[in-house]
Amino acid sequence: MKKFMAMLKKNEYEHPPPTKLLDLAGQLCREFQSSSPSLEKLVEAVMKCKNNRDFLTNIHVVRACVSVHIHKGQHDAACRLLEHCKAEEKEELVQLWHEVHYRRAMEKQQTDVLTPLQKFRVRKRNPPPISLCPEGLKSRNYSEEVRQHLFRFAAEVTANPNKKQREELAQAMNLQPIQVCNWFANYRRRRKS
């Protein structure tokens, strides 16, 4: 830690900071994960540094900073940090984004755990920013072409296909038979209501 602080002070105005310094920051963040006071001290030093954005290219530093912000109840600061960080591990950044919002929801509801449904609702209310998922959020919906084919089959043939029909539909549309089965079950349920 002392070595890192000395290197940080020495290279405070150097842009970008030396790779050795960035790597050491990541290594220390991994080591200090469990010890909060040391981690807080490290994060504070990194965030006060003039080149703090360069440190946010390392996923371990980002994770440590977010962890400290969550621990202090600074959810908005954690979100801003995630929005502007340049780490390349986008999936992990999205998970951190969700974790921040789960913690906020748990504090608001004064609980230690969220049910899967509560987590789903939190994710729906707080989608990650475009900076974290430039290709957009994964859609769980079928393409328009697949939906039209299924709707046509339901209207013209049957809304309750047998096993053979489901397998043929699945093969024709490159889906699993269970997906076709679930689609028709949902279709019948929607029509009933």
Image: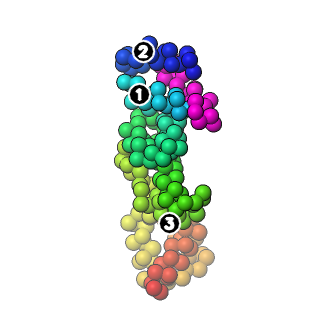
Q: Quadrant of the N terminus?
A: top right
Residue occupied by mark 2: 11
Closer to the chain start, of discs 3 and 2, is: 2
- State left or right for residue 32 relative to residue 101: right
Q: Label 3, label 2: how many angstroms apart (C-alpha)?
A: 61 Å
Q: Is residue 33 magenta?
A: yes
Colour scheme of the picture: rainbow
Q: Residue furthest bottom?
A: 192
User: What span is in magenta?
Assistant: 19-38
| Circle 2 SS class | loop
Residue occupied by mark 1: 48
Residue occupied by mark 3: 172
Q: Label 3, label 1: how many angstroms apart (C-alpha)?
A: 58 Å
**Magenta region, main secondary structure:** helix
Q: Is residue 99 above or below residue 36?
A: below
| Circle 3 SS class | helix
| Circle 1 SS class | helix
Contact between marks 3 and 2 (CB within 8 A): the answer is no
Closer to the chain start, of discs 1 and 2, is: 2
